Amino acid sequence: MLETIKTLEAKARELEPGADDRKYLRNAVVDYSESFLEGLYARPAYTTHPEKAAGLLASPITEEPAEMQELIELIRTQVDDPGLCAAHRGHLGYIPGGGLYASALGDFLADIGNRYSGVFFAGPGAVRMENSMVRWLADLVGYPAQAAGTLLSGGSLANLTAIVAARDAMGIRSRDVERSAIYLTGQVHHCVHKAIRIAGLADAQIRTVRMDAHFRMDAHDLERKIKADKAAGIKPWLVVASAGTTDTGSVDPAEAIADLCEEHGIWFHVDAAYGGFFLLTDEGKKMLKGLDRSDSIVMDPHKGLFLPYGTGAVIVKNGEHLFQSHYYRAAYMQDAYAENEEMSPADLSPELTRHFRGLRMWMPLKLHGVAPFRAALQEKLLLARWFWEQLAGMPGWEVGPEPDLSVVLYRYVPRHGDANDFNLELVHRIHADGEVFLSSTTGAGVVYLRLAVLSFRTHLDTIQQAIEKLQHYAAQIEAEGGW
Ligand SMILES: *Cc1c(COP(=O)(O)O)cnc(C)c1O
């Protein structure tokens, strides 16, 4: 047996490269990351790839080792080249963010140390760091000391976790679901509908509240619907507001909604996955007034704090509710439960073992300080406003409402032909061009193009470039006789 163990050990030791090997591997990775970053200003934001990365399929996992250079080549050609380059300054579609370098360094160290961030007992420093990030967010929102929250993979998981806490805190059991009502608008992010289904609430009465011309929740309609439900013996228990919406960047009126929720004893949840970090700016603070009156909130650091993908925060004003829905006391972990100086992330979400996400958020905030984040977010608000003003003054273009935050809706209205087809062709040509990436959406049967400014790498020159591209391709399609 000892012979076998030693043979196995010799092979198993290949998993732990020595200092020289590490240096070689690390240099290869760092060299590639440098060429990626240096090339970022010369490459397109969007690249159509005929094979759609099928080259990866030709390189399956085998028993044999491969060379690092070969892997880097696969990453470059199959992963980093095709499709949307989310690190690009020209990413102006969906909701961008960028991916801060300092976060990557934080992730590197989090992975090397592999600190356990699920429970305080095992990783007191990791948990304290992560909780301090949640506390920083809670302060930004204006939540009191008893707030609790955790960093999850993104806004979708964060919304689900908040809705589960709300469900339990409001005492909604299976038998109550059908006679309970949830209020949201047609602009709520689709992950909220997913969360409602996953949380066992699909049979609840889902009320779609009307919106005003700015796509904001109409508080009067909300009030009417709440009263009608109460009169019919249905229990209103949850309002989900957006700050702002993904599609249009609109901010629902938090103060008016909070008044109604207080009056009728309803849980007020705010999905601020996209817009929450504009609280760092004076203008954003005005626009987002009243968020401190919500019962729970979601904010995505991988959007407004420019982190690489993989971090969304949920915070509940009365942290006890988040805890009651998610804690568990397993016998095999009894040693871990004695120390309760800090809340443990494992007691605040469905996760147990998890990525140590605190470090990827802490590192950039400490390294840069908060000031450049404030400046960048203020800059994005102004860039969106500037784009909206430019287009409003350009012949042929029609703009949506003045942006609440940093998403702009607009379209070209051609002299002849169908405007929807024209704008779909326009966005298609922008994608084929690839220098900047814009996306489209449809509201009430009308196709709009969207501009979403939130990458830390996007500055004035990129917005000017987007305007030039739009003008160029609109003129080109017009010259072809419309679409
Ligand atoms: C992005 C977004 C989500 C979903 O968050 P993920 O991080 O993509 O899971 C939810 N709500 C809003 C308003 C968003 O913008």
Image (tube, rainbow, N blue to C red):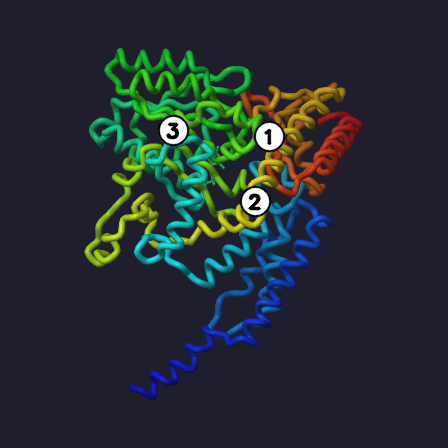
Residue found at the far bottom of this picture:
3
- The residue labelled by disc 1 is 406
| Image point (74%, 37%), residue name | 461
Q: Earlier in the sequence, mark 3 or mark 2?
A: 3
- Report crowding for label 2: few under 14, some 14 to 19, many 20 or more residues within 10 A (C-alpha): few
The percent coordinates of residue 329 (x first, y second) are 22, 50
Q: Secondary structure at mark 1?
A: loop
Pointer 3 with pointer 2, Cβ within 8 A: no
- Report crowding for label 1: few under 14, some 14 to 19, many 20 or more residues within 10 A (C-alpha): many
Residue found at the far right of this picture:
479
Q: Secondary structure at mark 3?
A: strand
Q: Which mark is residue 369?
A: 2
| Image point (61%, 25%), residue name | 409
Give the distance between the C-alpha atoms of the residues marked 3 and 2, in whole angstroms. Answer: 29 Å
Cβ(mark 1) to ligand 1 < 8 Å? no
Type of the residue with mark 1: Ser
Type of the residue with mark 3: His
Q: Looking at the image, can residue 308 be seen?
A: no
Circle 3 or circle 2, nearest the eye? 2
| Up/down of 464 relative to 41, above or below | above
The percent coordinates of residue 245 (x first, y second) are 50, 28
| Image point (31%, 33%), residue name | 318
- The residue labelled by disc 3 is 269
Type of the residue with mark 2: Gly
Pointer 2 with pointer 1, Cβ within 8 A: no
The percent coordinates of residue 456 (x first, y second) are 62, 41
